[in-house]
Amino acid sequence: MQVQVKHDDGTKTDYFGISDFSTTNEGEETKIALHFHRDVPADEPHPIVEGQIIGSASEIPYNSQGAFEAIKQTASKDDHKVIVGVTDHHSAVERGVLRVLNDEDFDGDLEVIA
């Protein structure tokens, strides 16, 4: 799934390749544990970010062209970052992010987690 998080400073991060997430509140802060579609060693915690979840969407309908467009457009927005967890679960997302990385015209904020 794709999950969009808004941070306290107004920036947003979209995460692709998420299988699930959980939230906890600590005072006024909300911490979000992200679960990617990949094996995580027992001694390695899931990534935890602070912010507010403002959107989520299924990646199931994406073909590689749809994933390419969604990732490229989102990562190219001002004050926006995209993090993609590459997994076998959604191969169209993997193919789409590879196309973005090879796109000479791409000038966005993108990180890939394998």
Image (spheres, grey):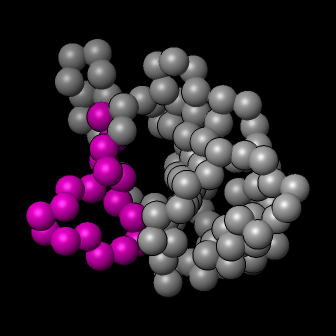
Please give the name of the residue rendered at 66% of the width and 29% of the height, measured from the top-left corner.
79
Residue reaching furthest to the right: 105
Nearer-the-camera pick, 78 or 59:
78
Q: Is residue 62 visible?
A: no
The answer to if 98 sits in the magenta stretch is no
Quadrant of the image occupied by residue 111: bottom right
Please give the name of the residue rendered at 72% of the width and 46% of the height, measured from the top-left corner.
108
When the figure is inspected, residue 55 is found, relative to residue 44, above or below; the finding is above
Residue reaching furthest to the left: 43
Relative placement, left or right, of 30 versus 54 is left
Q: Position of residue 30 (x, y in %)?
A: 32, 28
Q: Which residues are magenta?
A: 31-48
Quadrant of the image occupied by residue 78: top right
Q: Position of residue 74 (x, y in %)?
A: 72, 46
Which quadrant would the C terminus be assigned to in this image? bottom left
Q: Position of residue 50 (x, y in %)?
A: 36, 32
When the figure is inspected, residue 39 is found, relative to residue 36, above or below; the finding is below
Q: How many marks?
A: 0
Relative placement, left or right, of 85 versus 104 is left
Residue reaching furthest to the front: 104
Please give the name of the residue rendered at 20% of the width and 24% of the height, measured from the top-left corner.
26
Please give the name of the residue rendered at 75% of the width and 64% of the height, measured from the top-left corner.
100
